[in-house]
Image: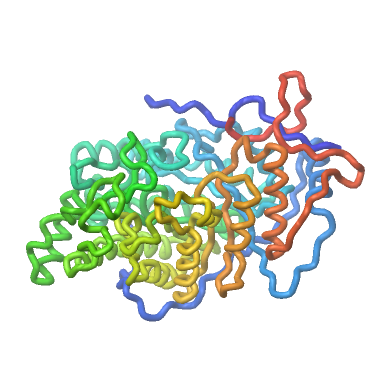
Amino acid sequence: MALTLRSSTSFMAPVDSKTHRASEELPRMLAFDVRKAAGRPPTLKAPRQDVIQPATLLQHAEKAAAELLHGPPAAHGAGTARVPVYVMLPLDTVSLAGRLTRARPLNASLMALRTAGVEGVMVDVWWGLVEKDGPLRYNWDAYAELVHMVERNGLKLQMVMSFHQCGGNVGDNCSIPLPPWVQEEMSRNPDIVYADRSGRRNPEYISLGCDMLPVLRGRTPIQVYSDYMRSFRDRFRDHLGRAIVEIQVGMGPCGELRYPSYPESNGTWRFPGIGEFQCYDKYMKASLRAAAVSVGREEWGKGGPHDAGHYNQFPDDTGFFRREGTWNSDYGNFFLEWYSSMLLEHGDRVLAAAQAIFRGTGAVLSGKVAGIHWHYRTRSHAAELTAGYYNTRHRNGYLPIAKMMAMRGVILNFTCMEMKDEQQPGRAGCSPELLVRQVKQAAAAAGAELAGENSLERYDESAYSQVLAMSRGDDGMGLTAFTYLRMNKKLFEGENWRRLVAFVKRMSEGGRRVVLPRSDTAGSDLYVGFVAGANRETKVDAAVPR
């Protein structure tokens, strides 16, 4: 029996562009310079459940695919470790109208992922969709439908508390802004969002400078995030720790703990530009002034570095980031300490709230850190500095982050696991491999669990092999899980699908080389992809965009 996955129409819906109670007391904030990390948080363990599909066709398709793709179970080699693989769902899995997009094809795609051995899926739970009707007015219905669908297919869920807007960054193919009532507050008070030196404001995420100020209709941003997560917990309490095994807590643009220093919208930034510092809203400037006064250097608090250049410059084009630039001066150290500490404290506030809310639910927490690998081989690491990671030739900027996450019992999720140095442009000073190695070492030293993602859509064997190499614990730090970016039409095409299946199997067996057969025991061909022509028979639709 041949398994054919087909979708004659796009899974992606067209984007319609027209369209308090007191928070629980949060635990005391941690200082960022933690000296001793707590024990490792629990590793993701999500045993599978056998699910009987109601449709006979789906039963036969799953049985045939399982026979072909998995075969008899193989013994694990000594010292190997299973790494569960998750797949990110499309960004618009829930539409702007608050409905699950193309539910039937989505269900078929989940069935296919299950037969491939995938552990589960990841989905963004957009603040801009759930709380769009007004403060404390939440609509979880579409996500509840998704949870039940995933559960019926025997898969697990990683659900992302996405407090950022979708649109304007790498891979964003739809637009989901922040809630309309939040946008109204932004219009009244533009300083609640980040701004660069020229005054350009970024609406992706609320500025951390006002974390503890009641700028959102009487609530602070931390209270708003807390109320949102608490409502989520109450709605999905019966699924937490069962179908929902992980909550990834968004802490910045793209859900990452960073500043929006390299926005792609309107051509503001292009790879491999150094980006710009985002500290010019009135709340960040007030904090900088106070920090400067506290060290007796009031003149240092008048603004960020005047010689840090522009978004698309290179380090040597600037006085601040060049080899012997002011980044390595007393002033540079003061400013970068303040800038990175503000980010770290923000992350700790958000994660402290999440820790208090989800404690005892059985779901683990994770937080995402960006893989900013360009200009890594320079002394200043300029692109990392503007994003808030004080990582230079002389300083490990990822260790404080790993320590904070370890103390909160949070898994550190890191990107660019698929990248090799040799594939990057030489002029950009890239080294994703050295960066991943540094983050793995920081996580190991801090006692933090580490998970991974790929940064860009890749379907080739080279990318999969690199992820396998990075996921192994040969250096003392393997991955607890890997999340693949992203489910789309191309993923289900013949060779791309075959490579994914082999990759998942190798990850489940600690990196053992797996070669899949071209046909099952009955000799029928395997084809997982899209059949051209309207008159071809459809076996199972796949919920993936064109």
Question: Residue 254's x, y, as percent?
Answer: 41, 48
The residue located at (39%, 45%) in the rendering is 271
Residue 481 picture quarter: bottom right
The quarter of the image holding the N terminus is: top right
Residue visible at 73% across and 33% down? Answer: 540
In x, y percent, where is residue 514?
Answer: 76, 57
Q: Is residue 174 left or right of residue 483?
A: left
Residue at the extreme top of the image, as rendered: 535
**Which residue lies at the image location 67% right of the left edge and 52% below the top edge?**
118
461 to 133, vertically: above or below:
below
Q: Is residue 78 visible?
A: yes
Q: Is residue 57 left or right of residue 271?
A: right
Viewer-proximal residue among 388 and 342: 388
Asked if 470 appears above or below 151 in the picture, the reply is below
Which residue appears at 27% of the width and 50% of the height? 276
Q: Is residue 224 left or right of residue 126?
A: left
Quarter-of-image position of residue 179: top left
Please state which of residues 443 and 272 is positioned toward the viewer in this rendering. 272
Residue in the foreground of this view, choosing between 422 and 184:
422
Residue 24 visible, this orientation:
no
Q: Residue furthest bottom?
A: 36
* Count of numbered marks: 0
The x and y percentages for residue 226 are 37, 55
Q: Residue furthest right?
A: 522
**Colouring style:** rainbow
Location of the C terminus (image quadrant): top right
Q: Which is nearer the eye, 395 or 388?
A: 395
Does residue 66 appear left or right of residue 415 in this picture?
right
Query: x and y percent of residue 413 in the render?
Result: 49, 60
Position above or below: 530 against 394: above
